[in-house]
Image: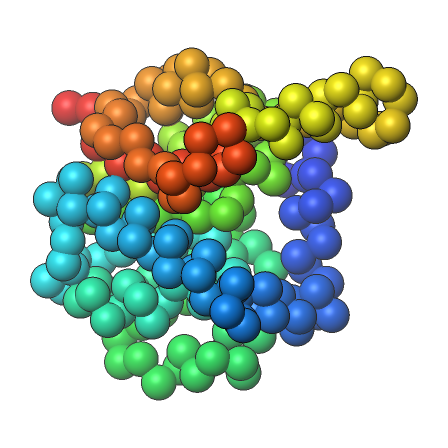
Amino acid sequence: MLPGVNARPAKLELYRRPEVAADYDQRWRGRGGARRQLRKQRAVAKALAALGLWPGHGRPLLDAPCGTGRLEDFFIGAGFAYVGTDLSMAMLRQSRSGNGSDSHDGASKACADLLALPFADHAVEVSVCVRFLHLVRDPQDRIQVLKELNRVSSHGVVLNYQHNRTLRYWNRRLRYKLGQRSTPPSQPSVAQIKEEVQQAGLDLVAWIPVHLAPGFSDKVVLACRSKA
């Protein structure tokens, strides 16, 4: 952890446990899990297309965090030169033993912290960050992650956020007010998300809902271009 950065959230530490990593892929299996996976893939593909980066044509792409390799086959199948990184060695080990990712020629993975990525400036053409930012409650930590993704990307960044324009958010907020939750909900507003993107040195190109269910689905994928 970097000096001056808030303590790592407990939810992030959870994914470093071997037993959690071993069960992680179960959520994407079955009919419901497969539908969620397909919706996320479609939204990410639309975001990459909005940046003029779909299909891959050999472009280097950073999947951060890559977890157990949930999107690895998808990116490689689209023609990207795949680089994955995750802080959890348990998740990286599971990806090697669980989904056969070692069979992909040229794909590489590294253990790294998104707050300080061990890559040179513009090392890849695009970075993709899926299912992570909602776990980072502190806005300054989120902005630092976005800055690092921007720094190592020469063209743009694709981000997966969860916003507060849902009935679930207001239900959680009410339960917190009533003392039924120990912590308040942390999903940022749409305006706050756009501000964080700007503070990280990125321009928002496209805002893509993952699931067209206004008031119920809070997941969006953002296509962002690095500012000149």
User: Is residue 92 in sight in this rendering?
Assistant: no
User: Where 32 sits versus 151, above or below?
Assistant: below
Residue at (80% x, 22% y) in the render:
176
| Residue 109: quarter of image | bottom left
Of residues 217 and 131, which is closer to you in this image? 217
Relative side of 184 to 113, left or right: right
- In the image, is residue 3 above or below residue 113? above
Q: Residue at x 31, y 47 (%)?
A: 43
80 lies left or right of 71: left
**The C terminus lies in which quarter of the figure?**
top left
| Count of numbered circles on the image | 0
Tell me: 199 left or right of 33.
left
Residue at the limit of the structure toward the right, as seen here:
179
Colouring scheme, one of rainbow, by chain, secondary structure, one colour = rainbow
| Front residue (pair 2, 198) | 198
Image-based side of 109 in relation to 181, left or right? left
Q: Is residue 104 visible?
A: yes
Residue 147 in percent (x, y) is at: 39, 30
Judge whether 78 appears above or below 127 on screen: below
Depth check: 215 or 141 in front? 215
**Residue at 81% across / 16% down in the picture?**
177
Residue 70, x across and y down, in percent? 45, 65
Q: Quadrant of the N terminus?
A: top right
**Relative to 18, is 50 above or below?**
above
The residue that appears at 14% across and 58% down in the rendered structure is: 55
Position of residue 148 measured from the top left corner of the image (x, y, whole percent): 40, 36
Residue 222 in percent (x, y) is at 32, 35
